[in-house]
Image (cartoon, rainbow, N blue to C red):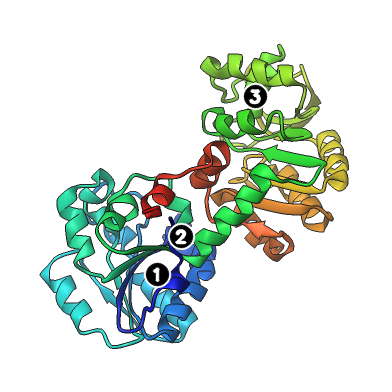
Amino acid sequence: MIKKLKEVNATDKRVLLRVDLNLTKDLRGRIVDDFRLRVVLPTIRYLISKKAKVIIMSHFGSPGGKPDKKLTLAPIAKLMARYLKKKVSFISEVVGPKVESRIAKLALGQVAMIENLRFDPREEENTVSFVKQLAKLGDIYVNDAFSVAHRNHASIVGVPKILPAYIGPLFEKEIKILEKVRTKPRHPFIVLVGGVKLATKLPILNYFKNKADSILIGGALANNFLVARGFKVGRSFYEPNLVGDAKKLLAVGKIILPSDLVVVANKSGSGIVRTISLGRVEEGEYIYDFGPKTIKGFIGIIKKAKTILWNGPLGLDEIIKFRVSTDSIARAIASAKAFSVVGGGNTVIGLDRLKIIDKFDYVSTGGGAMLEYLGKGKLPGLGALDR
């Protein structure tokens, strides 16, 4: 049985709160999207109101199990403090006597944040000694980090084996919404899948192939389906070992592919951009977006939908001129009457950039976790809370 945060009296308790503060940075190291921070603020404010002693723990980037000044949580602690309008005490270590001493001095309703969990290699290894050191920092454990609940890491699956464990309200809401889409979507039900690798999207494509009315495919993963249908994709990325899987999915009859493509001869995206029909990709070209015919066709399907699930950008969104399809479809979904659910880091960043994020019925914090839950109906981090 999974216990909810509001079931516990958190007053005067050291609450070890696992959140996901893996925020997006630009090439200069500046935070450019803080969506994951903003959505967890209500949980932190709730604990403050209950006079808990809140200990925030998170990862940030992939430092490889050692300290990296570029990936310290210190600036994120300052950003959180600005949002909360309350001091957030940053502790420059992850575990150990110094951390324990600083936490012991917390007063009721105060907030502290420990350093990046992944500065210690034992976090990703789920080492017992590290789990025990983390558990010493709290009286109860709360997981409100749905977006990393697919990881078998110490702070996700280890600590809840030791401390009384609870699901946070954000995590709980994510599961409720995604379960609704998994099992009781209103029809017509449209699944829109983009991104790069088909390998990561196969579980949800296989799960929804007989449940969705249409599955719209974009991004580089569409190249696998184009190859499966006998079209050449030039130098574009695809996964030869998964073309067979793409053929099987096409046989179901639900897959809708781009009908025109935006290509360029330079891998960097520079130079002349061509919009072409299928079958006209030259040997040295790269497919970086799809064209106006596809956009018009996809929007027509979207307008008729009652439920829309979207994961992954549809073009190479790192380059502005290849964001046309993603931005056009995003705006179409935002103005549609359907119940819309979207997830995936780059996709969410795009919605924030377009300032339409509030037009979607639900925006998931998870990319990989969303895919895994939709495809399998379970997550390691969720299972760890079921005691």
Of 69 and 254, the residue lying toward us: 254
Residue drawn at (57%, 48%) of the image: 344
Q: Secondary structure at mark 1?
A: helix
Decide: marks 2, 1 in contact (CB < 8 A)? yes
Residue contact between numbered discs 2 and 3, judged by CB atoms under 8 Å: no
Cα–Cα gap, marks 2 and 3: 30 Å
Q: Which label belongs to residue 23?
A: 2
Please give the name of the residue rendered at 78% of the width and 52% of the height, measured from the top-left corner.
Answer: 333
- First-in-chain label (1 vs 3): 1
Give the residue pinned by disc 1.
76
Instruction: Give amino acid for label 1.
Output: Ile
Q: Write down the quadrant of residue 365 in the picture.
A: bottom right
Q: Position of residue 47 (x, y in %)?
A: 42, 79
Q: Residue at x 72, y 14 (%)?
A: 229
The quarter of the rendered structure image containing the C terminus is bottom left
Query: Is residue 178 placed above or below 13 in the rendered structure?
Result: above
Tell me the distance, in whole angstroms, between the alpha carbons under discs 1 and 3: 38 Å
- Decide: few, some or many residues near mark 3? Use Cα within 10 Å; few <14, some 14-19, many ≥20: many
| Relative side of 82 to 308, left or right | left
Q: Residue furthest front?
A: 1
Instruction: Report the amino acid beneath label 2.
Output: Leu
Is residue 33 at all visible to an observer of this figure?
no
Q: Which mark is residue 223?
A: 3
Tell me which label, 2 or 1, sits earlier in the chain.
Answer: 2
Say if 335 sits above or below 375 in the image. Answer: below
Position of 111 with respect to 252 (left or right) is left
Task: Name the spot of residue 307 as percent of width and height, x first.
Answer: 77, 48
Of label 2 and label 3, which has the lower sequence position?
A: 2
In the rendered image, the vertical position of residue 298 relative to residue 363, given as above or below = above
Whole-Å distance between the Cαs marked 2 and 1? 9 Å
